[in-house]
Image: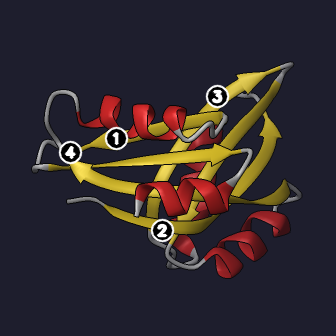
């Protein structure tokens, strides 16, 4: 069984420089905000962080105080069993429902569960399909 939710993701744009990961995550820690999901990459000399936190309002305020640009996205999260093929099944369900995936990221700590995050072109249809 999988657990499906619509969540709010913060897209944080920073300079791309050494130590920026520690600075972003340290800012969350100092604000007392727990991180639930993270994707980070660089593009065109900017750092991009996709964050799902336990308190997005507090996280957004703390990150904006550092001068970082923060925007909000709606995403679909799916908690699945950590087994071979589980992610493929979710991808097939969305594909069969003709839901386009703009991007996806995920992780597993090896404890039997994994978390996938999807930004799609039709969150309602994605939610209905996966529930």
Mark 4 neighbour density, 10 Å: few (under 14) some (14–19) many (20 or more): few
119 or 28, nearer to the observer: 119
Element at badge 3?
strand
Residue 112: image location, x then y, percent:
10, 49
Would you name the residue on which mark 1 appears?
A: 107
Task: Identify the element where label 4 is drawn.
Answer: loop
Q: Is residue 21 visible?
A: yes
Tell me the residue that label 4 is attached to: 109
Which residue is tagged 3? 41
Helix, strand, or loop for circle 1? strand
Instruction: Looking at the picture, tell me which residue is in the foreground, 9 or 74.
Output: 74
Q: Across the whole image, how many numbered discs are drawn on residues?
A: 4
> Residue at coordinates 72% horizontally, 37% vertically from top-left?
48
What residue sits right under mark 2 in the picture?
Answer: 5
Q: Earlier in the sequence, mark 4 or mark 3?
A: 3
Q: Is residue 128 left or right of residue 131?
A: right
């Amino acid at each position: 069984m999988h657990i499906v939710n619509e969540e709010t993701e913060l897209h944080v744009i920073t300079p791309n420089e050494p130590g920026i990961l520690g600075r972003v995550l340290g800012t969350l820690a100092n604000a007392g905000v727990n991180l639930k999901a993270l994707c980070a990459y660089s593009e065109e000399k900017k750092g991009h962080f996709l964050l799902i936190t336990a308190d997005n309002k507090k996280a957004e305020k703390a990150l904006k105080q550092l001068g970082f640009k923060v925007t909000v996205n709606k995403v679909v999260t799916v908690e699945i069993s950590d087994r071979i093929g589980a992610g493929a099944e979710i991808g097939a369900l969305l594909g069969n429902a003709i839901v386009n995936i703009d991007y996806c990221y995920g992780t597993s700590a090896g404890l039997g569960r994994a978390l996938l995050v999807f930004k799609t072109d039709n969150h309602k249809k994605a939610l209905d399909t996966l529930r």
